[in-house]
Image (tube, grey):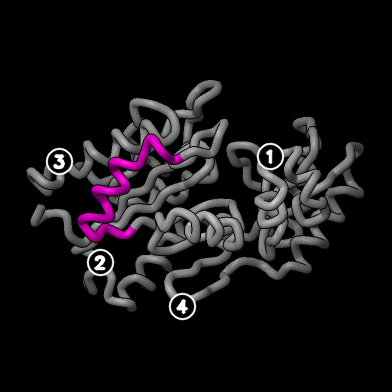
């Protein structure tokens, strides 16, 4: 196990560590136990809010750090940083989109817990946490391709972007999971939870959807989790490659992490990094 040092794991949640249908992570338990036994930090990196991530972590104690709202908010220990856009900017852009398209546009920030629960399948208490957001806002709508193009232009006009996730189009800032991952590594180094030299750190990232592309592209070892329902999306990783997990969700997560750790335990150079 002498080679399992300087590792850090970044994971998307919905459809990746958490099952797409029932939000269970149980199939990933063996790999999570192995990571924790080897003091390898696991960081959640998600479109979820920090309130949601804190609630998950308080129940299950899975993560050494939390990155919410697609990189807009980062919390590791007592260090909390929010590189995301102002809440007012998000609200103004969403209102402009609603005026410009011909379909109703609701969102997590404008909906009550009941409406969010209906859209997501979350329990009402969890849905309330999902609505507690500051620097991003998933839209609840049924857009045509024209509506999406209009919304993307308006988002750009406000210095924002519209990102397609596993379930929703999310209005957010130019922060993304890839940039947040690099910031989080620096924060872990400052807290002496990773080596001071970047060359001694190996980052592993796992995700399933287009809004994970930046994270996977920045990772040393990237794993794409196949979606549970439908074809595997083609992700633009800037010419880099990712491993494809053998199964969707936590089952594929578990198998992929065990395979990577086995290879690193045997020969560090056996892993082809995605740099």
Tell me the residue at 31%/50% (across/down).
204
Which of disc 2 and disc 3 is earlier in sequence? 2
Disc 3 to disc 4: CB gap under 8 Å: no
User: Between disc 2 and disc 4, whose residue precedes?
Assistant: 4
Residue 118 position in % (x across, y down): 76, 38
Q: Residues within 10 Å of mark 2 (few under 14, many from 20)?
A: few
Q: Residue at x 75, y 51 (%)?
A: 108
Q: Look at discs 3 and 1 and give the one toward the viewer.
A: 1
Residue 28 on the magenta span: yes
Question: According to the image, label 3 marks what residue?
Answer: 263
Q: Contact (CB < 8 A) between labels 3 and 1?
A: no
Decide: is 35 above or below 196: above
Residue named by callout 1: 120
Residue 190, given in percent of the width and then of the height, sits at 33, 78
Q: Which mark is residue 78?
A: 4
Q: CA–CA distance between discs 3 and 2?
A: 21 Å
Give the total number of marks visible in the rendering: 4
Mark 1 crowd level (few <14, some 14–19, many ≥20, 10 Å Cα):
some
Q: CA distance from mark 2 to mark 4?
A: 23 Å
Q: Is residue 39 magenta?
A: yes
Instruction: Please give the name of the residue rendered at 42% of the width and 63% of the height, measured from the top-left corner.
Output: 65
Magenta-highlighted residues: 25-41
């Amino acid at each position: 196990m002498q080679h399992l040092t300087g590792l850090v794991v970044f994971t998307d949640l919905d459809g990746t560590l958490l099952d797409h249908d029932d939000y269970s992570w149980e199939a990933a338990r063996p790999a999570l136990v192995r990571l924790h036994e080897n003091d390898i930090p696991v960081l959640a990196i998600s479109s979820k809010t920090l309130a949601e991530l804190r609630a998950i972590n308080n129940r299950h104690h899975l993560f050494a750090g939390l990155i919410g709202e697609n990189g807009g908010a980062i919390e590791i220990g007592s260090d909390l940083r929010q590189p995301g856009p102002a809440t007012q900017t998000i609200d103004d852009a969403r209102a402009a989109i609603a005026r410009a398209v011909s379909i109703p546009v609701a969102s997590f920030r404008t909906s009550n817990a009941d409406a969010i629960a209906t859209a997501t399948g979350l329990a009402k208490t969890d849905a309330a946490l999902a609505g507690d957001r500051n620097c991003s806002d998933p839209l609840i709508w049924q857009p045509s391709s024209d509506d999406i193009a209009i919304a993307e232009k308006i988002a750009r006009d406000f210095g924002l972007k519209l990102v397609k996730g596993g379930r929703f189009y999310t209005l957010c800032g130019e922060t993304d999971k890839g940039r947040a991952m690099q910031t989080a590594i620096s924060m872990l180094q400052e807290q002496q939870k990773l080596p001071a030299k970047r060359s001694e750190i190996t980052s592993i990232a796992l995700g399933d959807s287009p809004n994970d592309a930046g994270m996977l592209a920045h990772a040393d070892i990237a794993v794409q989790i196949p979606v549970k329902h439908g074809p595997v999306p083609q992700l633009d990783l800037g010419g880099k490659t990712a491993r494809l997990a053998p199964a969707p969700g936590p089952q594929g997560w578990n198998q992929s992490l065990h395979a990577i750790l086995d290879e690193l335990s045997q020969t560090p150079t056996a892993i082809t990094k995605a740099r």
